[in-house]
Each structure stands twice: as C-alpha cells, then as structure tokens.
Amino acid sequence: MGALPRFLRARGVDVAVVLPGYRCLRRPEFRWEATDYEVEVPISGEWIRAPVWRTAMRGGVPVYAIVADRYFDRPELYGEAGQPYPDNAERFAFFSRAVLDLVDAVGVPDIIHVHDWHAALVPAFLRADARRYEWGAHSRTVLTIHNLAYQGSFWAQDWHILCLPDRFFSFDGFEAWGNINYLKAGISFADWLTTVSPTYSREIQTPESGFGLDGALRYRSDRLIGILNGVDYEEWNPATDPSLEARFDVQDLSGKQHCKAMLQSAHELRVDETVPLAGVVSRLVPEKGMDFLAEVVPMIVERGVQLVLLGKGEPNLEKRWKDLGQEFHGHVAVSVGFDEILARRIYGGADLFLMPSRFEPCGLAQMYAMRYGAVPVVHATGGLVDSVIDVRTDPTHGTGFRFHPLALGNFLSTLDDAVSVYGNRKEWSSLRERTMRADFSWHRTAAAYVDLYMKAVVAPPFRDFPRE
C-alpha cells in the first residue's frame, strides 16, 4: 500500500487510500489536515461518528484516516502482549462501514480494492446491506488476500455488531465453522479475488493450504487470480541506499565486498571474502520455517558457512535463536528485534539469503535480497516459486536455489550446491548478476492490477441482492 497506489496513479488511475486512524500514524511529519467529512455508521444498534483526516503520500496520492479514538488510538494495531484486542470484531466492522460512508461522500468509485480480513467486510456490507448503499450497484470490489492464515474469525454471539439480517450468517455468507469469519465474508461477496502470487492462488484452493476456506475459494476460482507483489526500486536500490556502508550496483560490486566485510566485523565473524555468508531477515515463527532452520544451524556451521540473522516473533523462538548465537559465537550472529538499517545491511553484505518458509504468499525479503546481490535459497512454495528460478534446472536463467519438500536432506543438499557454486568464481558471478537483474518492479504489477480493474468494471457483480 506504500507503493501500489503511486504506480497506479502513474498509469492514469484516480486512486485514494483509506486507513484506520491508528495512533502510530498521528505524527507531525505526516501533515494531517481535518476534512469536512464525518462518517456515521451503525454498530450493534448504536450510531457511531468519527471525523476524517486527510494527507498525501509520496506521488500525491490522497490518504484518508478514519479518526475514531475509541477504536484506533491504541499502542498497537491489532493487540498487545501477543493477544488480540478483545473488540477487534467491532473495530474492523466499524472501519469497513466507515469506508463505505466516506467513499459515498467523496465520490462513488469504479473499484473498491480492499486488503485482508481487516477490510474484507467492505464488499460484504456493500452487497448485503444494498439498501443503505444504493450507489454500490455502480462499483466493483476486489479483495486481496495477503495471508490466508489470518482470517478475522469471531464467535457467533458477536453477530449483533454487524447490524445485518440473520440470513447472512450462512455457509455462503459470513459463517465458517460456526464462527463469523470476516475474510470468508469478503470471499463470498467480493466481485474479484486476488492473492499476492500466482502459485499461492492455487495452493490456497487445496485442503493442505486452505486453512478451512479452500472450498469457498474453489467455488470462486473463476474470479480468483494471483498477481505477484512488486518492489519499489527507488526505495530498495543498493546504488543509493544510505543504510549501506558502501554503494554498489551490478556493474561494480566492489562496494558489496566492503559491505560484507563490515557485516562480518560488526558481528564478530571472521572477515574473509572466501567464506560464504548467509543472511536471514524474518519473523521468528514456524510459518517462516525458523524452527526448522534452528535445527540445522550446527550443520550450516559444519559446512563453513557464516550466518547472520535478524528477526522477532514468538518468545520461545527468540530465546532459541539467542542461545544459538551464543553457542556458535564467531560463526552465527543473532539480533532479536526489528531494525530496518540492519536488515538492509544484511541484504547488502550477504552472499546467500535463506528462506525456508513453510508457506509464503509472496515474500518480499527474497526480492530485496536479490537486488542487493544475495542469492536466495528458498523452500519452493507460494511466491518463492514465482520469484526464484532454480539455477540447477535452468543454468541459463537461474536466479537462486529452490528445494522441496521442507526436509533436512533437501535443504542441506541444496545448501551444498549453493556453496559449491560460490566456490566457482565465474559461475557465481554470472548467477549473482542474473539475480540482481531480476525485475520485480511495481510497474509490471500495477499494470496487472489495471488490467483486472478494467475487466471488473465491465463485468456484472459476482452476486447482487434486491434493495429491500
């Protein structure tokens, strides 16, 4: 959402962004201004009002914030201390209603594009409460699923919050496995569905990767497509990145060698150009395979590979990785937390980039790493399949290494192959150059979304309801 709107605007789309007025957004540098707009929406029989602020993101795209302090003036976005806020069902039902009130006031759009369960009720309310939103007959909706594992599932007793007839709490509406499921509602009512990679759009239609919604997604398969996420190369460019100790590009990689030496030195690893240095920037959660990777650290070290990891996540995995950093001090360096500068320095200094994700809707880290000359070693799932070409099966076009399934032997044999290629200077240079030249720019991604929007505006709604 930081990049796509700008690139859509560059292609002639009149686009605006609507966000909850989170506390973390209320900073002076964002230059918010009050507007004359005020939303008023029903929640559990009560009418709730909130003002609307406006600013603009880079590129001039207008951004609106729904400033409802009772819902969004909080320390975190979704919860604290590992627990969701208990009123999340109400918070995001309010936001979805508020979006519809705002767009009605600002100007009826051709397309309303929403993301994940937090906004998935927008298309559901638009169709299920058609009498209130008469103008909705002229708009089409697109729901993008970034990660199906997060669905916004709430107990059935919360139904009163939504102010809808009971008939919509059904298998073809808001209900999934006895609960109100916000993402399921979006899947049921949105005109078009997208995911953030083509492979992921197919995977989530299977019981293995569907998280209980595979049947609903198979039913919508004719209007479900995958569009690979993009990278903003103005933001992610090793030739201009101020976070790096030295700049470099594909024509002159001397700066990358300096970045590697600085990364090794800063983390008390032996400074040696001939030693392959692997990087990891990840959430420390099983979804990302960080428990699996922890198991193989001793075998990584045995192969003479250095490892630098940055991440935060589940407390037990944070502790486990801290212990590994101490046990293999001088070979493995672990930083627990979020540090964008360090993340960029890992991309810039690493030779290899490890992503053993169990599932990966798209993945951006591997794309950043590739532009910064870190060759990816990835589990062949989701967007990792769509963004990394295995050099062993396609030596001419290969950009990295893929392994499947996620098993010890598969990973280690792939790592051995990567280390072997690293030892061949000519072969490694060719591979790294192809890796850095791989194009995942938002220009291509935005063009795919514009094509979808054009298709959507001329197609009838997926489903419609009489204005009762």
Image (spheres, grey):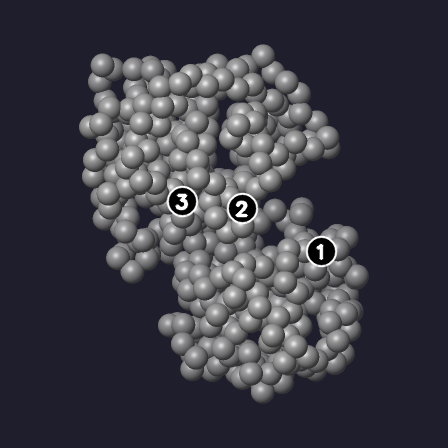
Relative height, residue 243 to residue 262 (above, below):
above
The dot on residue 341 is: 1
Determine which quarter of the picture holds residue 332: bottom right
- Vertical arrangement, residue 256 with respect to residue 111, above or below: below
> Is 268 positioned to the left or the right of 463 in the image?
right
- Does residue 139 appear to the left or right of 58 in the view shown? left
Q: Secondary structure at mark 1?
A: helix
Residue type of the residue flagged with mark 2: Glu
- Quick one: label 3 or label 1, which is nearer the N terminus? 3
**Who is closer to the viewer here, 150 or 153?**
153
| Above/below status of 96 relative to 181 | above
Circle 1 residues within 10 Å: few <14, some 14–19, many ≥20: few
Dot placed on the residue nearer the N-terminal end, 2 or 1: 2
Disc 1 marks a residue whose amino acid type is Ile
- Judging from the image, what secondary structure is the residue with disc 2 in? strand
Q: Nearer the viewer, mark 2 or mark 3?
A: 2
Tell me if residue 250 can be seen: no
The disc at residue 145 is 3
Q: Earlier in the sequence, mark 2 or mark 3?
A: 2
Assign a secondary structure to mark 3. Answer: strand
Q: CA distance from mark 2 to mark 1?
A: 25 Å
Comparing 46 with 217, the one in front is 46
**How far across and how far down the image is residue 365, in percent?**
56, 58
Q: Residue at x 46, y 28 (%)?
A: 95
Q: Position of residue 39 (x, y in %)?
A: 49, 17
- Gap in angstroms between the C-alphas marked 3 and 1: 29 Å
Q: Residue at x 44, y 47 (%)?
A: 146
Q: Residue at x 40, y 18 (%)?
A: 46
Q: Amino acid type of disc 3? A: Ile
Quadrant in which the C terminus appears: top left
Q: To which residue does mark 2 refer?
A: 80
Q: Is residue 441 visible?
A: yes
